[in-house]
Image: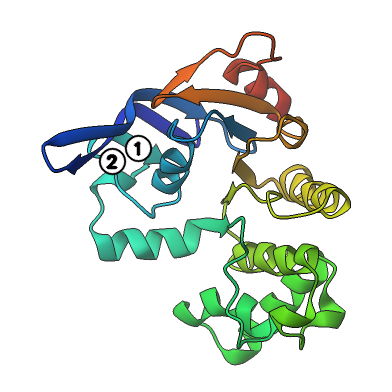
């Protein structure tokens, strides 16, 4: 059974007398341990799908079942609790709090968890060690390079040990060497720690790191002529 199951997934917004559908009747299965890249033009529904899977937003119609939980039917408070335990989010522009150190930024998600200060310290230290920034724990974002800031953001995303990591253009604001380093790190999290990783990107070179690349256009999954397109079945075989 897939970790993530979308059936007739639809998101609708109303603007005045107009109805806008970022996603419409989308069906998708994502096996556990998959590294999935989502590509498509601006406005195709990529980030909307990412935010639904991350529990930041909820579908208008259809079902979204993750690890047996129909997250589309959860209340806002229960959805927030589910998200804090199951999903880590990596943003393009890092979204670090500038007045907090790297350590304090990574610690933030744990402040919502029932754990001791010592337990929080151990998890933050482990996360920073994993992304190679143990020696920068007391640095503020302004004292870090863009690549280092994104590593802090990744440490924050994984500090709760979520099953799913979602990343919205994680290399979009980085130079090429930093982008390669970040993608190597995300691939390590997927391959060595078994995290299911779903990434939005416009860059084919970045998408090439994924096991599976799917293309969206006008809220629907489409084939992309001339682009190697791995099937969901192939992804299941790859992570089996």
Q: CA distance from mark 2 to mark 1?
A: 8 Å
Colour pattern: rainbow
Query: What residue do we see at 74% from left, 49% from top?
Result: 186
Q: Position of residue 86 (x, y in %)?
A: 49, 56
In the image, 141 versus 55, the foreground residue is 141
For disc 1, the marked residue is 64
From this viewpoint, is residue 114 visible? Answer: no
Lateral position of residue 231 relative to residue 46, left or right: right
Which of labels 2 and 1 is toward the front?
2
| First reached walking from the N terminus: tag 2 or tag 1 | 2
Q: Position of residue 132 (x, y in %)?
A: 85, 68
For disc 2, the marked residue is 59
Query: What residue do we see at 79% from left, 76% from top?
Result: 144
Residue contact at pointers 2 and 1, CB within 8 angstroms:
yes
Q: Position of residue 101 (x, y in %)?
A: 68, 86
Query: What residue do we see at 71% from left, 84% from top?
Result: 140
Lateral position of residue 27 relative to residue 85, left or right: left
Quadrant for residue 119, please give it.
bottom right
Q: Residues within 10 Å of mark 1 (few under 14, many from 20)?
A: many
In the image, 5 versus 145, the foreground residue is 145
Residue that extends furthest to the top in the rendered view of this protein = 225
Q: Secondary structure at mark 2?
A: loop
In the image, 6 versus 240, the foreground residue is 6
Query: What residue do we see at 69% from left, 77% from top?
Result: 124
């Amino acid at each position: 059974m897939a970790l993530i199951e979308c059936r007739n997934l639809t998101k609708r917004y109303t603007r005045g007398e107009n109805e806008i559908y970022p996603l419409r009747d989308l069906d998708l299965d994502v096996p556990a341990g998959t590294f999935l890249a989502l590509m498509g033009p601006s406005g195709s529904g990529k980030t909307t799908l990412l935010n639904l899977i991350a529990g930041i937003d909820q579908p208008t119609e259809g079902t979204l079942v993750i690890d047996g939980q129909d997250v589309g039917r959860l209340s806002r408070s229960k959805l927030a609790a589910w998200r804090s335990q199951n999903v880590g989010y990596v943003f393009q522009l890092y979204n670090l709090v500038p007045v907090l150190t790297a350590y304090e930024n990574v610690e933030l998600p744990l402040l919502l968890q029932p754990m001791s200060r010592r337990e929080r310290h151990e998890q933050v230290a482990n996360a920073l060690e994993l992304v190679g920034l143990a020696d920068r724990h007391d640095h503020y974002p302004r004292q870090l390079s863009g690549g280092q800031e994104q590593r802090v953001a990744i440490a924050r995303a994984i500090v709760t040990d979520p099953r799913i990591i979602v990343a919205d253009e994680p290399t979009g604001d980085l130079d090429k060497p930093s982008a390669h380093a970040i993608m190597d790190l995300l691939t390590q999290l997927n391959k060595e720690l078994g995290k299911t990783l779903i990434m939005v990107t416009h860059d084919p070179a970045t998408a090439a790191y994924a096991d599976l690349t799917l293309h969206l256009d006008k809220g629907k999954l489409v084939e992309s002529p001339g682009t190697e397109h791995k099937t969901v079945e192939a992804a299941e075989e790859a992570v089996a």
